[in-house]
Amino acid sequence: MTLPLPLLTASASRAQDDRRGRRHPRGTRSRAAHRSGSRQRMALTGLAAVLSAAACAGPTDTAPPGTTPPPVPITARPLDLTRYVPAPCSMVPVALTERLGLTRREERHENVLIGAGTQAQCRISAAPPLTGVAELRLYPASRPLPLLTGVTPAPTPTSVGAYPAAQWILSTGRDGSATSCHSIVDVAPGQGFSVLVNGPAGEAIEKSCARARHLAESILAGLLT
């Protein structure tokens, strides 16, 4: 690759001006000029090699920073959650939550996940004194997992049944606060649900996550029947 002519001309002109403007002791002028010329030729040769390598380099397999990986494909039978949106608590088996000591139910229709469109929630809690809370969240208009790309802390990929899922720990409870663990499941190209469990302070986060997953598995089993 040949460097652009203006760059070479400007470099040579500056080198000539420098040589004319310097005074060298007698007997050293020719040696200094020779060394200066050698250094200039080496610098230009190195620069040409760098520019040539950059011009000839091809694309790499590394994804550019900030790109979003494609979502995990859903290979199982797609499920439709839209019929549960008016009454989301109808998705949660009463016997199951009673066994967990969660007997109080409250339905909501709030957009808690940005960008997910229409949403619905079923909040299930223990009677006073409050010892635990579980919340089913329906996303009938968008897969929730791709919307969590790049969040901190990052969800851990997993699966529930044959469907792509993730475990998302929001609070371990080690600082004395309540635990918080999400089990999130994509059930169709544009739908999904999640189960959030908040455990009491002092409860091991593993126990809270196990309850969230158990609820998610039970809800999914009901959808498949």
Image (cartoon, rainbow, N blue to C red):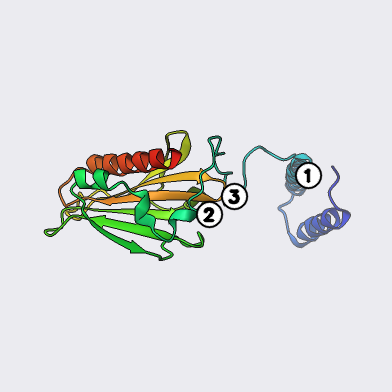
Apparent side of residue 71 relative to residue 129 in the rendered image (left or right): right
- Quadrant of the rendered image containing residue 210: top left
**Nearest-to-viewer mark from 3 and 2:** 2
Nearer to me, 83 or 166: 83
| Observer-nearest of 48 and 61 | 61
Question: Height in image: 120 above or below 38?
Answer: below
Q: Nearer the viewer, residue 110 or 41?
A: 110
Contact check, label 1 and label 3, Cβ < 8 Å: no
Residue under numbered circle 2? 142
Badge 1: few (under 14), some or many (20 or more) residues near its Cα, within 10 Å? few
- In the displayed image of the protein, which residue is found farthest to the right? 5
What's the CA distance linking mark 2 and mark 1?
A: 43 Å
Distance Cα–Cα, label 3 vs label 2? 20 Å
The answer to whether residue 139 is visible is: no
- Percent x, y for residue 187? 49, 44
According to the image, label 3 marks what residue? 67
Pinpoint residue 196: horizontal percent, then vertical percent.
32, 51
Q: Amino acid at mark 3?
A: Thr
- For numbered disc 1, what is the local secondary structure? helix
Q: Earlier in the sequence, mark 1 or mark 3?
A: 1
Q: Residue at x 55, y 43 (%)?
A: 71
Badge 2 element: loop
Mark whose residue sits in front, 1 or 3: 3
Q: Earlier in the sequence, mark 2 or mark 1?
A: 1
Badge 1 is on which residue? 55
Amino acid type at mark 2: Ser
Residue at horizontal 31 percent and vertical 46 percent from the top: 93
Viewer-closest of 20 and 11: 11
- First in residue order: circle 3 vs circle 2: 3
Q: Amino acid at mark 1?
A: Ala
